[in-house]
Amino acid sequence: MAQKPQKQSGARHRGGAAPGADAGIAAVSQGRIGNWALAGGLTLMTLLVVFLDFRTGNDLRLVPLLVVVPALASVYCSLRQTIWVAVWITTVVVGFRAGADGTFWDFVFGIGFAVLACALGVAACAARIRHATEMARLRSAAVTLQRQILRPLPVVTDHVFAYGLYEPIEEDRFVGGDIYEVVESSYGTRVIIGDVQGKGLAAIGAGFAAIAAFREAAIREPTLTGVVQALEDAVVRHNEFSAQTGEAERFVTALVLGFDEGGRVEAVNCGHLLPRLLHDGRALAVTLHRTYVPLGLAGLSQEDRRTESFDLPSGATLLVVTDGVTEARDATGAFYPLDERVAAWAGHGPRELLDALRADLGDFSGGIRRDDVAALALLRAPAAAADRIADDAVRDDDAAAGGKGRRPAATAV
C-alpha cells in the first residue's frame, strides 16, 4: 500500500547529535574556577602558609602541608590548571627545603614526597575528567538515540497539523521513554503520545518497540482498536524478550488518536493523561469516559479496549502531554498547574502555545527536571491552511539555518 506523501518540516529538533551534546562533553574538562581566581587564591594561600610557618619556627613546619593543594585542585580544576598548581606547589616546597636546615636525605625525601603528591593530584584530575567525559558521551548517546527514534516536528498531513515540544533529560539515571508519532494513512491520520514506565536505556528500548509497531499498524489496520491491539502485542513481545535477558518488564501509558475528514476525533486512552481542547478563547479537558489499562497489561483486565470520539472544531488546538509536564515541581514541591496555565494561553496558536509552555515550565521548576517533557499541539485546519502553515514552517527553518532548510522528500511505504 502506498502512503500518501506527507507535507512535513522539522522545527523542534532534527536527527543527529543532541543539541549541546558536544558542548556538554567539552564542559566536563573545563575547570569550575577561573584562572585569575585560582591564581589569586593560590597566591594568598601560599603567602599565608609561609607567614605562619615563619612565625611557628622549627617547632611546626607548615609549608610541606601545601602538597595537599593539588589534590584539592584535581576535584574542581581543569587538567591544565591542576598541572599549573602542582608546578607552583612543587616550586614553593623545593625552595623551602633548599633554605631549611637538615640532612641531605631530609632534603631528598622531602622533595620526593612533594613531587609524588603533586603527581598523584594531576593523575587524579586526569582520571576524573576521563570518567566524566565517558559519562557525558553515554548521556549524549542516550539522548541522541531518543531523538533518532522520534520524528522531527512539525508534521502536516491532510487531516491535522502537529506541532511538538520534546525535551529529553540528559542525566543517565533519569533518561525516560516518552514517545510520540504522527502517521498519515489511507484510513486517516493516527497519532500516539505515551510514556514508558521506568527510566534508563531499557525504557528507551520499550519505547522503540511501541513506536515501531505503531508506524506499521497505523498504516495497516483499518480501525483504531486494531492499531492499539498491535501496540499491545508489541509491548508484550518486548517484555517476553526482556524477561529472557534479565531486564525488568515495562508497560506503556498511551493516548492513541485518529483523525479523518470529518470533525470528530477517535481516541483510545490506555492509562494516559487526558487531552486539553483550546477553542474560542477557552481551554477544557476533553472528557473520555473510559481509561483502559496501559499497553502491556491487557492480560490483567477482562475489558476490551474500545474507541471514543469527540469534536475537534476547525481552528481548535488539541494539547496532549506526558507526565513530565504535569509532575514538574517547584521549589516547594507543588505540581505544575497545567489547566490553570493553559487557560491563560487559550488564544495562542500551536507554536506560541508550546513556546509558552516550555518557558513557563522552566520558570516554574527553576530549570530542574526529573523527567522527559513531551507535548503535541494538534490543529485541524482546511487543506489550504495546512499548506500555508507548512510553507511558513519551512521558511522559518530556512531563516534559522541561513537559507539552507528544505522540506524532506516524501517516501512510500
Image (tube, grey):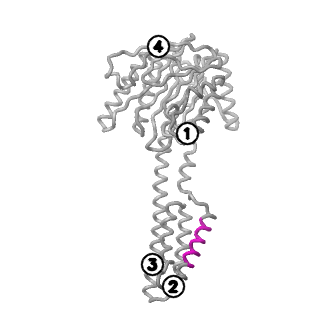
- Sequence-wise, the earlier of marks 2 and 3 is 2
Q: Rounded to the nearest whole Å, what is the CA distance between mark 3 and mark 1?
A: 52 Å
**Which residue is label 2 attached to?**
57
- Sequence-wise, the earlier of marks 1 and 4 is 4
Where is residue 214 shown, x and y percent of the image? 45, 24
Q: Given the image, on which type of amino acid does mark 4 rest?
A: Glu
1 vs 4, front mark: 1
The residue range painted magenta reads: 38-51
Q: Note whether residue 24 is visible.
A: yes
- Sequence-wise, the earlier of marks 3 and 4 is 3
**Which residue is label 4 attached to?**
308
**Which residue is label 1 attached to?**
365
Q: Rounded to the nearest whole Å, what is the CA distance between mark 1 and mark 2?
A: 55 Å
Label 1 crowd (10 A; few <14 / some 14-19 / many >=20): some
Query: Which secondary structure lies at badge 2?
Result: helix
Asked whether 36 or 79 is in front, the reply is 36
